[in-house]
C-alpha cells in the first residue's frame, strides 16, 4: 500500500494544527524528543510541561543519562512504577550509546524486553535514536488508523494487530516519519476523538472509511 495522499494530508494539516511542545521546537537532542513524546503518551497536555521541564533542566544529552545515578534519573521522570522501570532502560541504553557498544540497530523485539518498554516505546526508540521508519502505534493513533481503514481490532491488541500494524507502518514510511507520527497523535488528540470524532475538521475525511460509511 502506498500512502502518499495520507502522508501529504497529515503533513499539511500538522503545519497549522500540531501542538507546540518544547521538544518539538527546531532541532532538539534525540533524548528530549524521545522522552517528550513518551511522556505525552501517558500525561495530559497541561501536566506534561512540568514533568518535561524537570527532566530537561537536568538532562540534555545521552552522556548525562549514562553517568546519572539511577535515583537522580528516576526523580527527574514522572513518579510512577513504569517510569522507574524505564529509567533503568534509559540508563542502560545511554551507556550502550555513549560507550559505542551498539553495533547493530536493536530490533523491536529486543528493545521490548527492556524494563518498562512497550512495543510502541520500542518502535519509537528505533525512530528517534536509530532513524528507522516505525509507527508510534499507541491506543490513540490506532484509533485514527482503524477508523480510516475500517480495521476492527480488539482494543487490547492494537500494538500487534497485523492489519493495523501494517497500515501504521505504511503511513509513516516517509523520510518525515517523526512528523507523521506526531501529526497522527495530534489528530487523535484534537479531531479524531474517542467519543465523538470531529470529521468536519479532519484532513483525512474524503477517504476515511468510517466517514464514508456514515455519509453514504
Ligand atoms: S474522518 Fe473522522 S473518523 Fe475518519 S479519521 Fe477523520 S476524524 Fe477520524
Image (cartoon, rainbow, N blue to C red):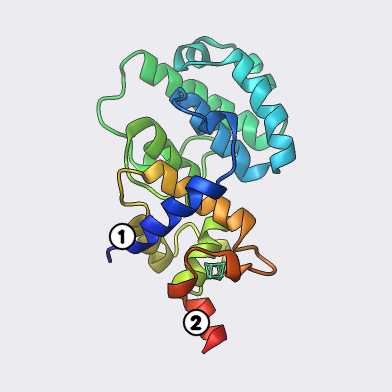
Q: Earlier in the sequence, mark 2 or mark 1?
A: 1
- Quadrant (top left, top right, bottom left, bottom right) of the N terminus: bottom left
Residue 52: % across, % down: 64, 27
Residue 95, compared with residue 205, is above or below; it is above
Q: Residues within 10 Å of mark 2 (few under 14, many from 20)?
A: few
Q: Is mark 2 within 8 Å of ligand 1?
A: no
Q: Residue at x 60, y 44 (%)?
A: 41
Instruction: Tell me the element at label 1.
Output: helix
> Ligand 1 quadrant?
bottom right
Left or right of 18 in this view: 10:
left
The outermost residue toward the bottom is 216
Task: Please state which of residues 68 and 62 is positioned toward the viewer in this rendering.
Answer: 62
Residue 133: % across, % down: 33, 45
Location of mark 1 (residue): 4
Residue 152, compared with residue 20, is above or below; it is below
Location of mark 2 (residue): 212
Instruction: Tell me the element at label 2.
Output: helix
Residue 31: % across, % down: 48, 25
Left or right of 80 in this view: 125:
left
Q: Residue at x 47, y 24 (%)?
A: 28
Query: Which mark, residue 196?
Result: none
Amino acid at each position: 500500500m502506498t500512502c502518499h495522499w495520507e502522508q501529504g494530508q497529515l503533513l499539511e494539516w500538522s503545519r497549522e494544527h500540531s501542538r507546540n511542545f518544547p521538544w518539538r521546537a527546531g532541532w532538539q537532542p534525540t533524548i528530549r524528543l524521545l522522552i517528550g513524546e513518551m511522556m505525552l503518551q501517558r500525561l495530559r497536555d497541561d501536566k506534561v510541561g512540568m514533568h518535561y521541564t524537570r527532566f530537561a533542566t537536568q538532562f540534555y544529552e545521552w552522556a548525562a543519562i549514562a553517568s546519572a545515578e539511577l535515583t537522580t534519573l528516576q526523580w527527574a521522570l514522572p513518579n510512577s512504577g513504569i517510569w522507574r522501570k524505564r529509567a533503568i532502560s534509559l540508563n542502560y541504553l545511554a551507556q550502550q550509546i555513549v560507550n559505542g557498544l551498539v553495533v547493530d540497530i536493536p530490533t523491536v523485539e529486543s528493545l521490548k524486553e527492556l524494563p518498562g518498554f512497550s512495543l510502541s516505546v520500542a518502535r519509537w526508540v528505533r525512530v528517534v535514536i536509530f532513524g528507522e521508519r516505525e509507527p508510534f502505534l499507541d491506543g490513540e493513533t490506532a484509533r485514527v488508523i482503524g477508523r480510516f481503514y475500517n480495521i476492527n481490532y480488539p482494543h487490547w491488541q492494537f500494538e500487534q494487530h497485523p492489519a493495523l500494524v501494517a497500515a501504521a507502518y505504511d503511513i509513516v514510511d516517509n523520510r518525515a516519519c517523526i512528523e507523521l507520527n506526531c501529526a497522527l497523535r495530534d489528530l487523535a488528540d484534537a479531531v479524531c476523538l474517542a467519543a465523538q470524532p470531529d470529521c468536519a475538521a479532519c484532513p483525512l475525511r474524503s477517504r476515511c472509511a468510517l466517514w464514508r460509511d456514515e455519509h453514504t
